[in-house]
Image (cartoon, coloured by chain):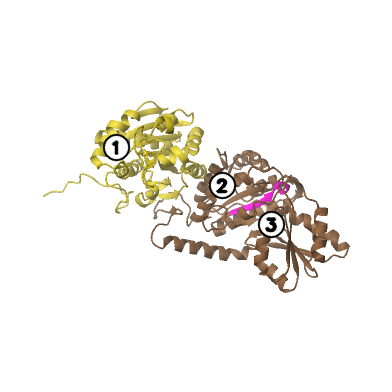
Amino acid sequence: MEEILAYKSPSLLADIPSHYCPGCHHGTVHKLVAQCLEELDLSDDTICVGSIGCSVFIYNYLLLDAVEAPHGRAPAVATGVKRSRPDKFVFTYQGDGDLASIGLAEIMHAANRGEKISVVFVNNTVYGMTGGQMAPTTLIGQKTTTCPGGRCADREGLPMKMAEIIAGLGGVSYSARVAVNNMKNFKKAKKALKKAFEIQKSGRGFGFVEFLASCPTNWKMTSTAANERLENEMIPYFPLGVFKDVQGEL
Amino acid sequence: MARIFIKGNIAISRGALDAGCKCYFGYPITPQNDIPEFMSRAMPEAGGEFVQAESEVAAANMLLGAAACGIRAMTSSSSPGMSLKQEAISYMAGSELPGVLVNMNRGGPGLGDIGPSQGDYFQSVKGGGHGDYRTLVLAPGTVQEAYDLTFLAFELAFAYRNPVVILGDAIIGQMQEPITPRKPVVPDAFEGNSWRLEGARGREPRILKSLHLTDGALAGHNLKLQEKYKRAQKECRFEEFMTEDAELIIVAYGSIGRIVKSTIRKLRKAGFKAGLIRPITLYPFPSEILKSLAHKGKKFLTIEHNMGQMVEDVRLSICGLAGSGFYGQLPGNLPTPNDFEQPIIDALRS
C-alpha cells in the first residue's frame, strides 16, 4: 500500500512531549509560528524573546535562538535585540497577564515607537501558569480564583481589547485578532501571522497578532466545551479581524 | 591625546563611546541627565542606537536585550531609577549577560534629594535585586577615573558575562575636570560569539535564560555563579595612600575618598599619621589589604556619605583584629576636607 504524507510537522518544532494541558491552544500557536517562520525562510535568522507564563518554555519547543525576558518586559528586551541586530528577525511571544497587565507600558511604547518587531499575543482570559487568576482580559461574569464571584465591571473594569488598543497607536503597521478554535479560524490566523511577519521582514514596522486561546484546565471545562466557550463567549466580546493594516485589509 | 575639560557625566559617556558602546538606553533623572543627552547625539553619530525608554524598567530590559546579542551597551540612572532597574539586573546576572549600568547616587530613601550621597552602597554591592548574585561595582573618585573605569566596566562585563555597575554620585557626575582621553577601542567582532544570539544558522539553538526548574539545576547554576564571583576577586582594585607609617587607616570610596585624601595631606603636615585605602572596586572588595594592615596593628576609620554601609565590609575584612570606627556624612550637603579633620583626629586619639 502506498503511503501518502498528509501532514509534516515543521522542522522548527522540537519532537518532545508537550507540557501544555490537553486542549490548550499554545501548542497550535507554536506550530503556526514555526510554519510561518519556515515558509518565510526566517528560521536561521530569528531571535525569539520569550516571556513569563505558561509559554515560558517556548524555547524548548521552537528550535530558535532565544532569550527569556522578565515578566511583561519582552517588548523592551526585543527593542534591545532589534536595535542591536536590525538584520535579524525578532518576535515576542506573550500571554495576557504578561502583555496586558504587568507589561502594558512596554507593549504600548514599543508599538508606539514602531519597533520593527512582531508580537504574538495569546489571550486565554486567565493567568494560566499560576493557576487561573483574573487577567485584564477576563470576561465579565467569568469566575477565576481571584474573582470567585465572577469578574464585575464595577470593581475590576472591563476586559481590555488589546488588538484594538494597539491598532490605535501611530507606530503600528499591523494589528489583528484571530483564533485557532476551528480550521476556518486557523487558516485565517495563519494568514494574519504571516502578514505580521512579512511586515517585519520587509522592514515596515510593528506587527501585532492577538490569538484568542482556550485554557480548559483553568476554565474547568473539557477541551470541546472550551472551544465552544471561545466561539460563543470570547469572540462576541473580542471580535476577530484586522484592526490595522497600513498596506490594506487582508 | 589632548586634554579636555569635561563633566563626570560626559566623561562616562565619552568613555562608553570610546570603549565601543553601540547601544545606550536611558531615562531622564537628575543628576545624570547629561549622559542621555550626550548619548542621544553621540550614539547615532557613531553608528549606534539611542533609545529614550518609557521607564527605567524598560531601559534596563533593553540593555538585557542588547546584551543577549553580545553588543556593548549601557544604561544610566540615579538612585530611584536604579531601584527600578534591579529586576533586569537580577535577570542579567542569572542569565549571565554583560552590560554596564551607571548610578549617579543621590540622596534617599525614596525621592530623597538630588545632591550627592553614598546611600546606594548596599544596593550596589550586595546584589540589589532578588536572588543570590553579585554585580561588579566600580567607584570612580575623579573625572579621569570615571572615564577610565568605563573602559574597564565593558571589559569586565564581557570577561565575566555579568552586569557591571559604575557607582558615582552627584559630585562625580557634575564636577568638571581635565582628563586625557584614550585611543578609542573597536570591540572584537567575535566578542561573545560563543554564546550571543544571532539566529541558529547551522548550529544548535542558544537559550539565554535564568529559569532552572529541573531537579538540582538551579543549585548547579548558583554554584557556577559563585565560582565566577570567586574568579572575579582578582579584579580587586584600590588606591593606597600613605599607609606605610600610618597609625590610622581611613577607608573611603568615590568622591569621599578623594576629599578625605586632601584632609589626610593637611593633617600629615600637622604630624597626624593617617593613611587611606580607597576601594576602586567595591565588589570585589579589597578585604586582603585591609586584613594585612590590621595584622600590622593599624586602627581603622571608615568615612562614608551615608550612615554606615561599607563599614560593615571593612569590619568583616578585619575580623575584629583592630579597632574600627565610623564617621558618616549626612546627605544634602557637599562635604569639604575640613569636615573630616576632627573625626580623623578623634579617631587617632581614641
What numbered label is drawn on residue B308?
Answer: 3
Q: Is residue B184 left or right of residue B5?
A: left
Residue A222, x across and y down, in percent? 24, 42
| Residue at mark 1 | A180
User: Is any part of residue A117 visible from this angle?
Assistant: no
- Amino acid identity at mark 1: Val
The chain drawn in yellow is A
Look at the image and give the residue range highlighted in magenta: B164-172
Q: Secondary structure at mark 3?
A: loop
For marks 2 and 1, give the CA distance: 37 Å
Q: Residue at x 52, y 47 (%)?
A: B66
Asked whether disc 2 touches disc 1, contact meaning CB atoms under 8 Å apart, the reply is no
| Residue at mark 2 | B85
Q: Are marks 3 and 1 on the same chain?
A: no
Residue A128, x across and y down, in percent? 36, 44
Q: Chain of mark 2?
A: B
Q: Quadrant of the C terminus of chain B?
A: bottom right
- Look at the magenta stretch and give its main secondary structure: strand
Residue closer to the observer: B323 or B32: B323
User: Is any part of residue A232 visible from this angle?
Assistant: yes
Q: Nearer the viewer, mark 2 or mark 3?
A: 3
Q: Earlier in the sequence, mark 2 or mark 3?
A: 2
Say above or below: B221 vs B47.
Answer: below
Q: Is residue B345 left or right of residue A139?
A: right
Q: Are marks 2 and 3 on the same chain?
A: yes
- Residue B239: quarter of image: bottom right
For marks 2 and 3, give the CA distance: 24 Å
- The residue at the far right in this view is B270
Residue A123, x across and y down, in percent? 37, 38
The chain drawn in brown is B
For marks 3 and 1, give the CA distance: 59 Å
